[in-house]
Amino acid sequence: MTTFFSAIGLVLLAFFWQVTLSGIARKVVARGQKRMGPPFYQQFLDIFKLWSKGSITHGFIYDFGVIMALGGTIATLIFVPAGNFVVFKGLDNFFVITYLLAIGLLGMAMSASGSGNPWASIGVMRGLTQNLGYELPFLIVVLSLIYDYKTGSISGIAEAQQGMGILGWNLFRMPLGTIVAFVSLLGMLGKKPFDTPIAPAEIASGPLVEYSGKHLGLLMLQHEFAQFIEVGLFVNLFLGGGTVIEFLIKYFFVYILATMIGNVMGRFKIDEVVAFYLKVPLLLAFIQALIIIFTGLGVSVWL
Amino acid sequence: MALNENEKINEIDVNELDCRDTKTFWEKFGNIFRSKSLWMLHYCTGCGAIELPPTMTSRFDMERFGMGPMATPRQADVLLITGYLSVKTLRRVIYTYEQMQTPKYVVGFGSCTLNGGIYYDSYAVISRLDYYIPVDLYIAGCMPRPEAVMNGFRTLLDMINKGEAKGWKRYLKYNDWYKRNQIRALGEVYVKDEFHE
């Protein structure tokens, strides 16, 4: 019963924190362009407005894919620890999250293909291709982390960093790996150099082109939850987790930094995205993995 | 307008007849959100479109009111008819309007949408938009300056909040009247749908 209520609590925390931050990010983007920008609660208004609109269906697969994407993402979300707030203690394994996260993406892909719009197919193809690009360097860095900490548990890795204050964070122990993970995080969040899947001016917002009203509202919610998972993973693995408050503060800085970087960038073409990820970050990730495996530097450098 | 003089448009005053908001609780509640977040379709037809970039960017900053451009009609709430509409474009506008989801609003820019403007007698340009799709708000000017556009949008937001922007209900209720006018101007076409064959 406690697990049930803490799962509900985590979902509500993710909803209110991430949707507020999305609004603040819109404000940040606006200030970068010398505008006032919308109020910080604008994202809530958008989501609630979409739920009050009419919507059409393009068949069973189209409806079912939306539910599958949202359900799969919420199921992934409750495995992600928010600092020391862990819903399933001992089960918050990195591999569980990696496998479950694919359900959301595949549900979205299935549903968008079911809509029958050619832009949607192109967008889904681009999304899955980009997934191929950023997963590989990110997984190599995290697997070398898991190799050295001898645990796959997210909260275990977060706790292992907390002995020595700020110098214990993996950000300072393995800066190379952190840079790789942050570049991968930009791709996961779909921030500007890597927003190829939903390029609004090119392919009319890609997979979302046929969604309207309630379907679009649910998918926006799914996107917010997915962002919470991705930024939460980064904060736990590289910035040392901490208590819930510390977690949320670190989360804030990571998310706003990603937004500000995205704000000054152009957009890659999809072949450039994959070529970039498989050249620079993958090489850096291999170097980081080799350093950790052969010299023991990185994870144990300060010890 | 592509109409003969002897086949007049069958005038009924659609604005006079009753299609008020039901004003239920959920309707009022939804109108609050709809009036604070309005996504417009980036489908610009005439010369008024050139006033939209300054309205969106840093000087006039439309996003303050939660308004923003959307790339696809499925996601949009408001359709902007920015000036004259040729008969060929009208067909596309109607397709676009019918793809938008139900609380949807239409804003007409300038005198061309109101009475034809300088294209009043042209055979290729329609001279009054609200025979074909229901218009919620006209913005005066030829073309309206960004201040006028912002003022018009604020008026539209107030109308939505009070439940007065009910053009989409009119389109549902008097659909056969609108269809008759559309067919009279455009003629019927057979649309070949390759995808669903």
Image (cartoon, coloured by chain):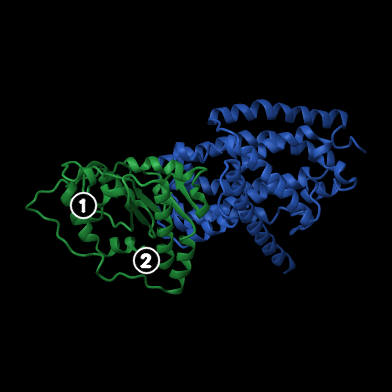
User: Which colour is chain B painted?
Assistant: green
Callout 2 crowding tier (Cα within 10 Å): few <14, some 14–19, many ≥20: some
Residue B27: horizontal and vertical position, in percent?
A: 43, 69
Amino acid type at image mark 1: Gln
**Going 76% across and 57% down the picture, which residue do you hit?**
A86
Q: Which mark is residue A122?
A: none
Residue nearer the viewer, B12 or A150: B12
Counting residues from the start of the chain, the first of labels 1 and 2 encountered is: 2
**Going 48% across and 65% down the picture, which residue do you hit?**
B32
On what subunit does the disc labeled 1 rest? Answer: B
- Residue tagged 2: B164
Residue A22: horizontal and vertical position, in percent?
A: 61, 51
User: Which colour is chain A painted?
Assistant: blue
Residue A164: horizontal and vertical position, in percent?
A: 90, 45
Q: Secondary structure at mark 1?
A: helix
**Going 52% across and 39% down the picture, which residue do you hit?**
A197
